Amino acid sequence: MEQILRDRRAILLLVGPALLVYSGVVLLPVVWSLVYTFFEGNVIGGFHFVGLQNYRQLLRDAAFWQALVFTLKYAVTVTAGQILLGLLLALLYVFYLRRASALVRTLVFFPVVLPTVAVAQLFAKIFAIAPQYGLVNAGLALLHLDGWIQAWLGQGSTAFWVLALMDIWRAMGFYAVLLYAGLVEIPAELIEAARVDGASGLRLVWHVVLPLLLPILLSALIFSINGTLKVFDSVLALTGGGPGQATTPLTLYMFNTAFSYGQYGYGSTLAMALAVLSLLVTVMIFGSARRDVA
């Protein structure tokens, strides 16, 4: 094996095909999109060079800043919910349910495999106000809390929280399984030694379990933050970006700009802004991870 790894032709033969596919599928569209940011137009009307005009428009575009704020708020809220609840579930599996956790793990993981449209329809029914009350409004009416009954998806503030709740519920089972895999790899001897030294409960989790789980926890954080920054299908299926533009993330704004309004150049500029945002967040997390792990 060592001889093969020293042979550059063997390395090229083994890595070359995968590198070509990766370049064609991932890198080429990114470069193509970057070139589009300097043009205006579409495939029907043709393109013409506009230089940095799309970037100047981006800085002055109020809808872009609104979508950026929504995207960041959504990413922070949903990532915190997914990781925190996933961690609590993983701790529950390992320290309390143990061998009996298989059924609970399966039930909690089940929403992960459900189609996004089906989950969105379920939540739309739960929070419906017309033509008849959904589960939430019916429960409030039963408790005589009529003042709290409202169109949950008809207002930007409440629609945001319904959307966040849906995506936290959908994905927390995935992060619970991911963190569970990290927890079971922690040597039992270390846990027992910490218990003999008097650590238990929150002290055991904070001072022993979390430091040992940190690499998996950071991986989960990167998965979650990158997924939530690029949220698209959940928003499209549940609110369509509304009411108005209240729940429109950068991805949906970019999609509408490029494919609904035919502004390929400005749509590509929005896509580049999102790519730079995702890259910056990932680099920040990696930088923090290096310091913490070191």
Image (spheres, grey):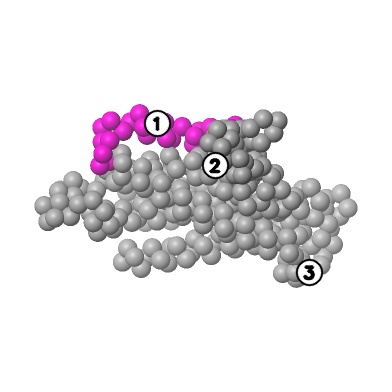
Distance between mark 1 and mark 2 Cα atoms: 18 Å
Q: Looking at the image, which is closer to me, 282 or 47?
A: 282
Whole-Å distance between the Cαs marked 3 and 2?
38 Å
**Does residue 30 appear in the picture of this structure?**
no
Residue 204 horizontal/vertical position (percent): 22, 54
The relative height of residue 89 versus residue 78 in the rendered view (above or below) is above
Q: Which residues are magenta?
A: 94-122
- The main secondary structure of the magenta stretch is helix
Closest to the camera, between mark 3 and mark 1, is 1
- Which quarter of the figure is the C terminus placed in? bottom left
> How many marks are shown on the rendered structure?
3
Instruction: Indicate the position of residue 250 as horizontal and vertical percent values.
Output: 66, 55
Residue 92 vs residue 249: left or right?
left
User: Where does residue 112 sit, x and y in percent of width and height?
Assistant: 49, 36
Residue that appears at 57% across and 58% down: 73
Upstream in sequence: badge 1 or badge 2: 1
Q: Badge 2 is on which residue? A: 166
The residue lying toward the viewer, choosing from 152 and 122, is: 152
- Asked if the residue under mark 1 is in contact with the one under mark 3, i.e. CB atoms within 8 Å, the reply is no
- Can residue 203 be seen here? The reply is yes
Name the side, left or right, on which 175 lies relative to 114: left
Q: Is 37 left, or right, of 109 in this rendering? A: right
Front in this rendered view, residue 159 or 206: 159
Q: Which residue position holds label 3?
A: 53
